[in-house]
Amino acid sequence: MLPQSLFLSLFFTLISSPSCFSSFQDDNLANFLDGTPGPSAYPPFFGTIDKDRAVDFEASFANLQMEYEAEIVDSTRYDQLGTPATSLGEVNVDDFGAKGDGVTDDTEAFKTAWEETCSSNTAVLVVPQNKKYYVKPITFSGPCKSDSVKLKILGTIKASEDPSDYAKDRSRWLLFYNIKNFQVEGQGTIDGNGKIWWKNSCKINITQPCTMAPTAVSFVQCDNLKVYGLNVQDAQQMHVRFEESMNVQASNIMVTSSEESPNTDGIHVTRSENVQIIKTVIKTGDDCISIVNGSTNIEAIDVTCGPGHGISIGSLGGGKSEARVSNVMVNTAKLIGTTNGVRIKTWQGGSGYAENIVFQDIKMENVSNPIIIDQNYCDQETPCNEQNSAVQIRNIVYKNITGTSATKMTTIFNCSKTLPCQGIVQKDINLVYKEN
């Protein structure tokens, strides 16, 4: 995980336009589920970066060689046949009545199995392989008795596609809430079964109202979390969401959905700290990775993205809200056929900042808008009025980004007139327009 001490204060020469902890109060689960917080519903939870600490960028990030590979390899055990090994004392959802036939509603069996797991010292729940479990919206809630908890997903968990099953909360399908030292592993599949939701999206069918659709997998207030080896596919809307969580490692995950699926972000990070996304492949209809308000110390390492909308910071500042994002590194990524490359997008009228962000060692193939900062982002039908305030964008580094662009403009800095971009640095950029 990124060390707590990694608060970078970067001072760069401005080469773009020259003009151009209060702690989070834990909600109880009932209040959390009842509310639908907006972008400013919670206070920022990190302190001000010490502007007097001049830290050399190259030296600081050279020390960020995370020794994650051995940890990932060691954390999954295999028998001689190549299937995940099991242990005595594990809780199996089949033992609580789950059928796994893809038709029977297994929700209650999952709830009962989780209650047994969370209240035991063993604290390992297994979803067996070669089965498909049909599950309605469900919350796996902590805290649990054991110091650490594990969920092994070896089979398939498939979502109900009936919108009436989500009447109480349309925002989530599988919710993991307030579980500490939690590990989710396996070569199984989480299937959001999202096609009916895509069909009824206002972005696909303009006669439909724009309404919320469920996120397939949400981790909320899950500190010291590891998620690896999973396949997450066809989410109703977002695929995986990390929210209000600290010390998160997500690795070797495959996220896939149709290129035409609306709002299906691959991995979404909000109000979280010390997050690593490692060796992950994301192919969706929206942002491969989106990092939004209240997120700091975020790393994406060895990510393959496309199709999709690229890797995004934001959007930030919508609805005149305050947004704060800092200390983000995207290191060693490959983008293929995406509608944007590496993007920072903020609405006019917002406040706060996006700062100390690095995009480096990135290869692009047939990518539109490879490098883009847009402080005038406007994702609505009517034009956005010009505002006097903006989210400050500063200390942004683009280094060793190469490949082909599907658009003639390879770099776009659409900065605010009132609060323009500051400290934008580009080094070793080689992007060539290639006409399709």
Image: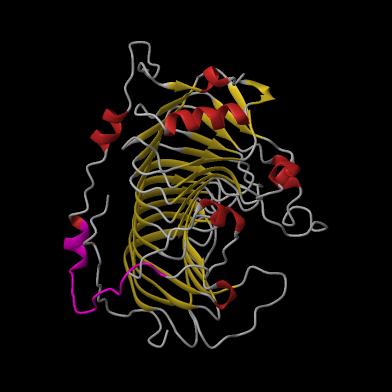
Please state the total of marks drawn on the protein image.
0
Q: Position of residue 294 (x, y in %)?
A: 42, 65
Q: Residue at x 46, y 33 (%)?
A: 230
Colouring chosen for the image of the structure: secondary structure
**Is residue 255 shown left or right of residue 192?**
left
Camera-side residue of 94 and 319: 94
Q: Is residue 179 visible?
A: yes
Comparing 388 with 13, the one in front is: 388
User: Which residue is at the front of the view, 375 or 72?
Assistant: 72
Q: Main secondary structure of the magenta part?
A: loop
* Residue at x 24% of width, y 59% of height: 4
Locate residue 435 relative to residue 302 in the image: left or right. right
Residue 391 appears in view:
no
- Furthest-top residue in view? 80
Residue 53 falls inside the magenta stretch: yes
Check if residue 3 falls in the magenta segment. Answer: no
Give the magenta part as a residue range.
Answer: 44-61
**In the image, is residue 406 above or below residue 187?**
below
Residue 98 placement: quadrant: top right
| Residue 336 in picture, x, y percent from top left | 49, 47
From the top left corner, tell me how far across and down residue 188 is, in percent: 49, 27
Q: Residue at (58%, 53%) from the top-left corner?
A: 33
**Residue 200, image x and y in percent?**
76, 49
The relative height of residue 24 versus residue 302 in the rendered view (above or below) is below
Would you say 267 lies left or right of 402 here?
A: right
